[in-house]
Image (cartoon, grey):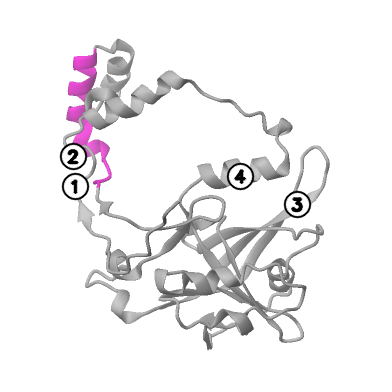
Amino acid sequence: MFIPPFDSTTYSTYTQSPNPSWRYGQRVDSTPAGKDWVAGESAGWKVYNTAELDKVNMTKLLNSGIVPRPIAFVSTINEEGVENLAPYSWFNTVTTYPPIISFGCNNNALGGLKDTAANLKHSQGFSVNIVSEPFIENANSTAIDAPPGFDEWSISGLTKAKCVQIKASRIKESAFSMECELYKSIDITHPVTGEHTSTLILAHVKYIHVRKDMLTQRGVIDLTKFKPVARVGDISYARVGDAFRIVSPTWAQDKSKIQEALDEAKIPEALATLSLL
């Protein structure tokens, strides 16, 4: 199978949403694209009982179905001062006030803690860095199953930068880095076997380092310059394509539109509830 080379000249842009004229209650199959999507239902559903899936197939299914996933590129340091670098894609924001992020760290092949989980439990602080297109191969190299205590910085080709508060380094090439302290770690155990399989890390973000050329006049990150990379299953990564903006609905502004949609759909139960609100 021919795979074309990566096109570094392509940039994300903003477009209209898929159905900008959508109204409350409008069915998915009311547009040509929606009709094609719904037509796929004719093939039916395959239902998986997770109790009957082995680890390999469970991983394949979840990793390819829960996408795209942002990547937490985590820098830690152990008590002897040896630094560690590793990417994790079970990652996201938990809350912005206080600023808490989370990522999951599966145990290693022998069932023990990976260096990342072991290091951050010693409260040395750690940095979480966002990966962008120009250094995705560098980041991927640190996912190697190196023996405990190996410093992945040495093979990454990346540059250490000092942090304000924590001992661990941040990645200078990352345009968005967070200095973190451990908020809480939760051991994940299998509900049937009791086996400890993973550790959920909740991190309190103390400082955020943002490259100035990434900021818009509104003080947010410019997606078209940031070029973040995501995981999408097996060994696949993805770049961010075109983006679109959809206004978040508010009850005060849209109550009359909802009333019209319910009138048209003739749903008496919903109309009765609406009249009480």
Give the residue number, with chain letter if any, for mark 1: 16
Q: Is residue 198 above or below residue 138?
A: above
Range shown magenta: 246-265
Give amino acid for label 2.
Answer: Pro
| Left or right for 184, reference 92 | right
Mark 3–mark 1 contact, CB under 8 Å? no
Q: Earlier in the sequence, mark 3 or mark 2?
A: 2
Q: Secondary structure at mark 2?
A: loop
Q: What is the three-letter code of the residue carrying label 3?
A: Thr
Q: Where's residue 41, x and y in %?
A: 41, 22
The alpha-carbon separation of the residues under discs 3 and 2 comes to: 44 Å
Q: Residues within 10 Å of mark 4 (few under 14, many from 20)?
A: few
In the picture, measured across the screen, residue 227 lies left or right of residue 131, that is: left
Magenta run includes residue 253: yes
Mark found first going from the N terminus, 3 or 4:
4
Viewer-proximal residue, 87 or 133?
A: 133
> What predominant SS class does the magenta segment belong to?
helix
Residue 133: % across, % down = 41, 69
Relative to 140, 135 lies left or right: left
Q: Which residue is mark 3?
A: 197
Distance (Cα) linking label 1 and label 4: 33 Å
Mark 2 or mark 4: whose residue is earlier in sequence:
2
Image spot of residue 198 (x, y percent): 71, 54
Of the numbered discs 3 and 1, the one sitting upstream in the chain is 1
Q: Is residue 85 magenta?
A: no
In the rendered structure, the answer to whether residue 57 lies left or right of residue 169 reads: right
Q: Give the residue at x 80% y 61%.
A: 112
Disc 2: which residue: 20
Residue under label 4: 60
